[in-house]
Image (cartoon, rainbow, N blue to C red):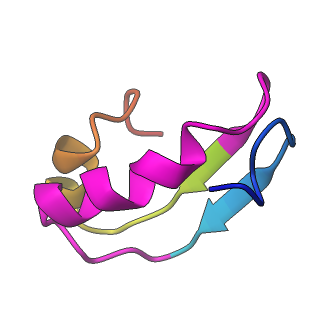
Amino acid sequence: MEVLTEKKFFLVLDDVWNKDYIEWKDLQKPLMFGKKGSKILVTSRNQDVANCIKTSPIH
């Protein structure tokens, strides 16, 4: 967590298939310490993944 503390980042997770909510929450924990304006982009062909991470509308 110290690595991301007060640092702005842009993380791309491409073609994600893991739809386990608990694992997503574990991934989110260290990312919550990033600087305001940090972004995470997730792409997936699996609608269940989108539902799990509570995405914005599909494009």
Q: Quadrant of residue 16?
A: bottom left
The residue at the point 36 percent across, 35 percent down is 55
Q: Nearer the viewer, residue 23 or 45?
A: 23
The residue at the point 18 percent across, 48 percent down is 52
**Is residue 10 shown left or right of residue 1?**
right
> Which residue appears farthest toward the top when viewing the image?
36
Quadrant of the snapshot with the N terminus: bottom right
**Is residue 4 shown left or right of residue 26?**
right
- In the rendered image, residue 20, in percent from the top left (x then y), is placed at 13, 66
- Please tell me whether residue 44 is drawn above or below residue 57 in the rendered image: below
On whether residue 35 falls in the magenta region, the answer is yes
- Please tell me whether residue 21 is drawn above or below residue 6 in the rendered image: below
The residue at the point 14 percent across, 55 percent down is 21
On whether residue 17 falls in the magenta region, the answer is yes
**Is residue 44 shown left or right of residue 47?**
right
**Is residue 37 shown left or right of residue 58?**
right
Q: Quadrant of residue 14?
A: bottom right
- In the rendered image, residue 39, in percent from the top left (x then y), is placed at 70, 39
- Please tell me whether residue 38 is drawn above or below residue 44 in the rendered image: above
Q: What segment is highlighted magenta in the picture?
A: 15-39
Q: Nearer the viewer, residue 53 or 15?
A: 53
The residue at the point 23 percent across, 58 percent down is 49
- In the rendered image, residue 8, in percent from the top left (x then y), is placed at 86, 40
> Which residue appears farthest toward the front when viewing the image?
2
Q: Nearer the viewer, residue 46 or 13?
A: 13
Q: Quadrant of residue 6?
A: top right
What number of labels is visible? 0
- Please tell me whether residue 15 is drawn above or below residue 38 in the rendered image: below
